[in-house]
Image: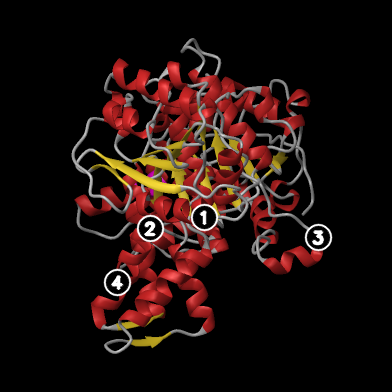
Amino acid sequence: MAAGVASARLGFEETLIDLIKARNPVLLVETHEAERVLKLVRSVAQNSEIRRSRRVATYTLTNGLQDGVAPGRPMAPDAALSEAAKVTEPTIFVFFDLHHYLGAGGRPAEPGVIRSVLDAAREFRAGRVPHTLLIVAPALPLPADLEKEVSVVELPLPGKAEIEAVLDEIITTNAANIVVDLSAEDRERLLQAAQGLTLGEAENAFARAIASDRRLDADDIDLVLDEKRQTIKKSGLLEFIEPAGSMEDIGGLENLKSWLGKRKDSWLPAASEWSIPAPKGVLITGVPGCGKSLTAKCMSTLWGLPLLRMDVGRVFSGLVGSSEQNMRAVLKLAEAVAPSILWIDEIEKGFGSSSSGDSGTSQRVFGTFLTWMQEKSKPVFVIATANKIDGLPPEFLRKGRFDEIFFVDLPTPKELKEIWRLQLSQRLTDSSRASGGLVLSDGLLQRLAEESNGFSGAEVAEAVVSACFDAYSQRRAVQEADLFRSIRNTTPLSKTQEEQIRQIREWASARAVAATSREDSGELALVGASAGRDVTSYRSGRQIEY
């Protein structure tokens, strides 16, 4: 039997029943939820769809084989597999510690145990008694000898119904000592906050919420979310980004902001009445320092969804097979937290070299991600940013992967004026203005925008910081002269990387949508028609009205 992941269209129990009926001899479930697996297996063992009901026996290193009747004794795994083959009643053997002997954690697999599994597989498949070996492990890259013998069964994280059952149980158990003050909406939000946790983690989160003040109310939603943050942090593959700022903190990019605003709440059930699917994602490319990453952070506030940042470098690991497993774990966690936003910053650095000579690992990981983007059914919105988009493989950019590709150019004069206003408003306090400092007049902002033509948003922000340092060193308020001096002392990226920026614009002129609205950009000229002009004096990017 060829190894493979059982169809995601079927539930865990349905898949397990099918594989048992087909007499697949060895199954693998990768999960931390050992007790949940055992509970589900015991339910399946007595399912009427299986013609001959099964007993359930478990194996651990400390207790050996146990069938729930006779106590076990410590036993080596190869000896336990040999004993299992002698059992005369149809049985599902659930082995919990076998992965330690099959190469988990980078340790070498033990040949004797591998041979015992192969012998058991041969006996369970063709023997008179229909047994099934179910290996439960947090993670297990299969040895080559077992790849064709083992079927991988995916156990999804608990759904809303399972988490709700845990909540109801903990409320019932503590009913005499606690106060429950949850509206129907609060309860729904609490359950949604717990999605993405294992049943044990959800129970711990609810228990912590109750223990803090002997109440369960809307204020406890943040405690449950904190437990989710810890879970994501422990995975080491995703980072939970706290909501910060709003779209009003971004100067310009009105096309992009309008596009995102119109897709807010599109994952809710009400959107299905309009026959629209949940948006897949957006790719934002352009000049460095012009607001791509800031847009991702502010989008979490706009949509009210958790923002998860994936560091592609962490996905790749030195252990054979673990990179592919890491990618599957990332995608599984993002879907479990859905609806959510998955942010991949500077994606070209992670996937731009997918064809490099690394025994095909990069290509397999990249292929897994592409397939998931195309076929995902959970509302996980992917926002990817790239500075050098021409370094990405062509298949990554075709329609169907992303809903749209936006190009972020250097700020227009109108956008520069708004960026200066935002940056100065954030940096200058009322007390500094009252003591003879700056007055943010329209005229001043206009002169600053004209003087800083060709600056990126990040360079404007640094110019303001530099001016503040100059003023602080003399313990005085910031003056206009400080700002203009900072501008003169800055050599913008549009000068130091003029050729690179021109190349980015040439690529975007026919392939991307301008993030800046037509009203903000004024008369735009395509790169091809602007030969010989200064790099700061034209804009490129196909215009679409939103």
Residue labelled with disc 1: 46
What residue sits 74% from the left and 46% below the top? 522
Disc 1/disc 2 C-alpha distance (Å) = 35 Å
User: Circle 4: is it few (<14), some (14-19), or many (20+) Cα within 10 Å?
Assistant: some
Q: Is residue 403 left or right of residue 330?
A: right
Q: Are marks 1 and 2 in contact (CB under 8 Å)?
A: no
Residue labelled with disc 4: 207
Q: Which residues are magenta?
A: 461-465
Instruction: Please state, as top left, top right, bottom left or bottom right, where the C terminus lies in the image.
Output: bottom right
Task: Return the disc, 1 or 4, that comes first in the chain's sequence.
Answer: 1
Instruction: Kindly identify the amino acid type of the residue bearing the numbered disc 3.
Output: Ser
What residue sits 51% from the left and 62% below the top? 301
Instruction: Kindly identify the amino acid type of the residue bearing the numbered disc 2.
Output: Lys
Residue labelled with disc 2: 228
Task: Return the disc, 4 or 2, that comes first in the chain's sequence.
Answer: 4
Q: What colour scheme does the image use?
A: secondary structure
Task: Return the disc, 1 or 2, that comes first in the chain's sequence.
Answer: 1
Quadrant for residue 237, please give it: top left
Residue 203 seen anywhere in this rendered image of the structure: yes
- Mark 2: secondary structure: helix
What residue sits 64% from the left and 44% below the top? 376
Instruction: Please state, as top left, top right, bottom left or bottom right, where the N terminus lies in the image.
Output: top right
